[in-house]
Amino acid sequence: MTSGFSHEACLKSLKASVQKDVASHNDDSVIEFTNAYQSLPGLDADKRTAADQSIKNLIADDIHQILKSEQTNVGVVKRAIRIISFAVNVAKHGMCSPSLPFSLLGDVLDCLTLDLCDPVFCFIEERVATWKSTQFYTAGKNHLLRMCNDLLRRLSQAQNTVFCGRIQLFLARLFPLSEKSALNLFSQFNSDNVTIFNSNPSQSILKNEKNAQSDKDPPTLNQKPQKDELWLDGGANDMEVDQTDLDPSKNRDEKKSENSLIVDFELYSSIWSLQDIFRSPLQCYTTESWEKFAKNAETVFRVFDSFKLDKQHFLEEQPHKAYFAKFLTSEKLIDLQLNDTMFRRQVLCQFLILFQYLLGTVKFKSASAMLSDKQTKWIGESETKIYALLEETPPNGKHFAAYVKHLLEREKYWISWKNEGCPSFIKVREPDSQKKDAPEEVQSPPAKRRKTADVSKPKKSTIAQDFVLGKPLGMGSPELTRLWELCPDNLAACKSEKRSFLPTLEGFFAEGIELMDPKNMVEEEYMSYNDPNFQWRALRLLSQRSPLFFASQPAQMQFKVVSQYLKGIMKKLSEEFPQNAPETAEVVPENGEIDKSMEEEPPRDEQREEGEDIDEGEEDGDDDEVLEDDQFDNEDALLNDDSQQEDGDSADEGLLEATVPGDSLSSDQVTTIAQKLGKEWEKLAPLLGLNSKDIAEIRGDSEDVILRARQTLVTWQDRKKENAKRPALVQALTKAGMEDLAKEFGGN
């Protein structure tokens, strides 16, 4: 312990700073805590220990308040979540242990009820990217795995199915695909899952039909119920009955449907005896267990096949409510379970999963675990029966059967992947040194060498040598030679105007501009700028005919859709075109002559100097126009050709000033302001009209404060459009207390 450091004083100071930051909602900035931490004497290790303890004490106080209160205190839970969020940001700055947030989460979840655990787990779900970062992943992955497993033990898979699924999905997002901690690598079975049912016929309330019927005969149909017998009805409405109706001593109604059967002890025992095989499939490789399993399976198949569920009952649309039942083994419930669609599907799917294991190749299956040809044939026939039964089971039987088949086919790929030792899905490129050290049989064969010319034969001159010496060139065929010799100067041939097939701007946009004329009364949906094909060709043409088109766009226009963008461009071009513009698009003729009339037209600035009275109000356009014309004031060179822009360097130097009309902000200026704002962007965001939801979305999109600041400014520009000017930003900066930045930016 260093001299001057007091643990108690440090705890008191840090705890007070944490309370101030949490109360003022400074979870991200941690200003008070940072100032208190830096002002304390001592080593960083001692101060981090004190910081951990101070935050733990606050969480302990909140937990004690929750346990002491008899009512559900949601506010205290939200405050505990804010403290944990505060601990995450403190850990990012290195002022506490990286494992502290996970320790706090574990303590809170252990002390809360399941209802209050849901908002805490939502906090964990939303920060998967934070937990997967380098700073937290190593320190917290075991804590998170332990927390999730503890929650799964407390939750009921039948009543809290959605919550359990969210936990499984969170773990799948947290851990990489190559993580083997959740894999059953050795193909072990859950032998502890024992199904307890009545296996003693003498203690059964059901009638024992073993001596009355042979095993080959199906259950008795169209008989009247006797004493100690349960009738199975085809109507699914029998599921809703009282416990008094299950008393076997009372007779059922005498009127039964024609499709009814007696549920005896043999059927009950056959159904629940199968669960022992499903629990431990290795029993199928013994003769005695296999014969018993096959006999019980055939009984179940006969019952499901002979007794059909009433499809008419499932034709009515029912609300989609997912419920995964835990079926009980009571003898009084067996007739209701056979009327249940989910019970039938669960038993049949268990058969399919078992058959896939028995027929598949499993790495850790012993060599003696082999099926005979007779058993393999029986499994194939049984699979056909099962899929037929699934298709007949309402509702949507065919769709459900196809989905199960597809799911089992996909499972084969995962089994194959596990048999291969679970290789990583990320392939690493081998260095060249390993390829050289590889054995000869692994290396690729050497490349074939070209055959050398015969020395005795006279050597032929190459085309390059003939070209240098000025000899006639042979290109391989007379036609190619003729085409090559059409123009002796290849460079001049490439620059020929005959090779230019681009239409002029005036000829291409003339038809679209004519459609935009209000006199023609053309509906909006039929305008040329709404055609995707026209949009693509227009942008390509503008990029070739006028390079200033892309270089001189104001910041407000960067988020316009293409149709609106071209609409404004075409309005501007209509002012540049002469009054006798052609109606159809013109293509450069074959002789290469291009109409230069547009290039000879004096610029608009010269027209104003000559005395033309131009109404500024007309140039600004109407309020309902998509793009303001003042955004195109620097677009006078749209019709100019590339040849008119020889002074490239001088134009680039003043590009920023020339392309931003008035007080508009360019993209470069927005980036510069964002770099100087930094973490102060949250103070500026509300003054720019952004609400708390917008700020939360910006905070969640990126961890970089500069990117957050730039996204804030861009969102402001996108919403305010033409009102997003320099004076408005300077005013907002001044209100936020950033006078220096406001003066610096206002002066520019």
Image (cartoon, helix red, strand yellow):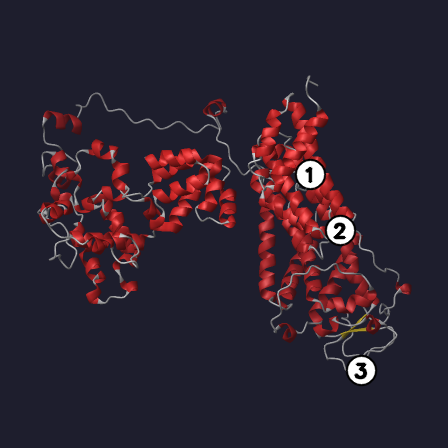
Of labels 2 and 3, the one closer to you: 3
Residue 37, image x and y in percent?
Answer: 62, 28
Residue 731, image x and y in percent?
Answer: 40, 42
User: Among all residues in the image, which is located at the extreme right?
Assistant: 202
Q: Residue at x 40, y 44 (%)?
A: 714
* Residue 598 in view (yes/no): yes
Q: Secondary structure at mark 2?
A: helix
**What residue sits right under mark 2 in the picture?**
279
Q: Are marks 1 and 2 in contact (CB under 8 Å)?
A: no
Which three-letter amino acid code belongs to the residue tagged 3?
A: Glu
Q: Residue at x 11, y 25 (%)?
A: 469
The reply, left or right, for residue 173 in relation to residue 516 is: right
Q: Residue at x 17, y 27 (%)?
A: 464
Taking depth in this image into account, of 295 and 157 the one nearest to the observer is: 157
**Disc number placed over residue 254 in the picture, else none:** 3
Q: Secondary structure at mark 1?
A: helix
- Asked if 417 appears above or below 534 in the picture, the reply is above
Question: Of the residues under marks 1 and 2, which one precedes in the sequence?
Answer: 1
Q: Are marks 1 and 3 in contact (CB under 8 Å)?
A: no
Which three-letter amino acid code belongs to the residue tagged 1?
A: Leu
Quadrant into which the C terminus falls: top left
**What residue sits right under mark 1 in the picture?**
104
Of labels 1 and 2, the one closer to you: 1
Residue 468, image x and y in percent?
Answer: 13, 25
